[in-house]
Amino acid sequence: MANDERDDEETLAESEEDEELEDESEEDEDEPEEDEDEGSDDDEDGGDDEPEEDASSDDEPEEDASSDDDEPASDEDDDEDEEDEDDRPARASAKRSKGKGAKKVAKQKSAAARLAAARAAKAARKAAKRGKELKDEKAPIDTLADSKVAQQAATFSDWASQNKPTVYGVVAAIVLIVGGTIGWLQYQEAKTADAGAALAAAVETANARIRDEDEIPDEDDPPSYTSVEERAEAALTAYDAVIGDHSGTPAAAWAQVGRGEQLLALGRASDARGAFEAAIAAGGDDGAILWRALEGKGFTYEAEEDWDHAIETYEELSRTDDGRFAPVARYHIARMYIAKDQTEQATETLSELVESLRDAENDEDEQDYSYVLAQAEVRLRELDPSAVPARPTLGGGPLGGGSPLGGGGPGGDSQLSPEQLQELIRRFQEQQQQGGGGGEGE
């Protein structure tokens, strides 16, 4: 209602403005008319007088004859003419006033009609404008409706209406596939977490403390064993459980590596080699697994004093992961030369290794092998004391001196004990988890 009243007021105001403009226009038109009326009156007076003068001039003889009789009549006519001239402006003004009043009354009488007409015109303009807007809005819809996509959608809609069971079946299948995929991913995530926990427990067992036989451990102490063999058997059982319960996972591949290490500690080199080969097959492109498995496989050949096969295995390791583990492989190859009494080849290999690692000491990408550098210097000094300047070494650390990688394995200068092997594995595991940083003494 308020909006309608406001629209009426605006419409009426517009109408009144139009009226005022019309009145002003009419006044301007009346002024020329007044002048014309005055002019016409003057013309009429002039026109009447001139003929009278002419007539009087023509009738001069008669005027003399009847001058006495006509004098009263002439005076009356003059009086009437004077009265007409005085009343003429008043009559014109009255005429104009009468005309304006009539127009004003007519305007007042037609105000309602004009308002109604204005409303109708305004409504018509709004309707025309709204029609144009609707047409513009509808144009894209009409274009879309005529498009090929819309026609195909309509065809599919008709087909779906006629084949509702099929549509419902497809939708149900999609829901099952999506739900099954999500469920499978969640299951795999949970399975991976369980496998990781089982692998961590097996590694903890493999690195458990060896206690004295007469030592009685506390109940709250972590598991410990009285011999390396006892611990290796316990760790082997734990790794077998990971492989059996979590096959196909990265944890199972790592468990094969651990299993090979424990079999090697028990003196079962051939069985250990089988475990390492299984780890290589399961590891795929995982460089860390390939490194540990190939190195372990080389150790099995060393245990059997098969130096040539060991060298072949270490050469394969040097090519793994774009040569990432080449320093480790070259150190092992040098040890094999020492085991074969090929001192010259061993000295040359170690000299090149020490030089390259020293040049890369400040390179973060090579920091993983500072431990290898220290042990290569020790080996090179043993072969030729003048070949390398003296520098601080690691002093053997927990491995008790000599080569941390076993001094050539079972056929080298110093036998690598299973305990030393486990410690070496632990160190390499820590280096891999930290992404580098060298070994002891850093």
Image (cartoon, rainbow, N blue to C red):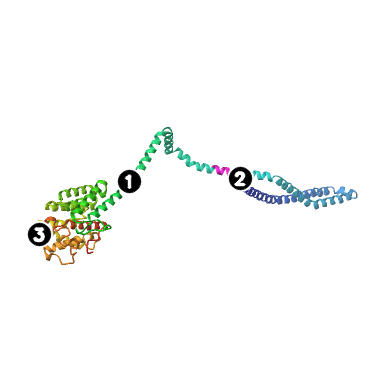
**Residue bearing the label numbered 3:** 343
Tell me if residue 354 is in the magenta stretch. no
Element under label 3?
Answer: helix
| Quarter-of-image position of residue 429 | bottom left
Magenta: predominant secondary structure element?
Answer: helix
Q: Earlier in the sequence, mark 2 or mark 1?
A: 2
- Distance from the alpha carbon under mark 1 to that under mark 3: 56 Å
Crowding near pointer 3: few (<14 within 10 Å), some, many (20+)? some
Quick check: can you spot residue 247? no
**Left or right of residue 320: residue 192:** right
Quarter occupied by the C terminus: bottom left
User: Residue 86, percent across and down?
Assistant: 80, 53
Q: Which residues are magenta?
A: 122-131
**Left or right of residue 413: residue 47:** right
429 shown above or below 1: below
Q: Nearer the viewer, mark 1 or mark 3?
A: 1
What kind of residue is marked 3? Thr
- Residue at position x 62%, y 43% from top? 120
- Residue at position x 27%, y 48% from top? 249
**Residue bearing the label numbered 2:** 122
Element under label 2?
Answer: helix
**Residue bearing the label numbered 1:** 187
Given residues 268 and 426, the one toward you in this image is 268
359 shown above or below 132: below
Quick check: can you spot residue 234? yes
Q: Earlier in the sequence, mark 1 or mark 3?
A: 1
What kind of residue is marked 2? Lys
| Quarter-of-image position of residue 119 | top right
Q: Nearer the viewer, mark 2 or mark 3?
A: 3
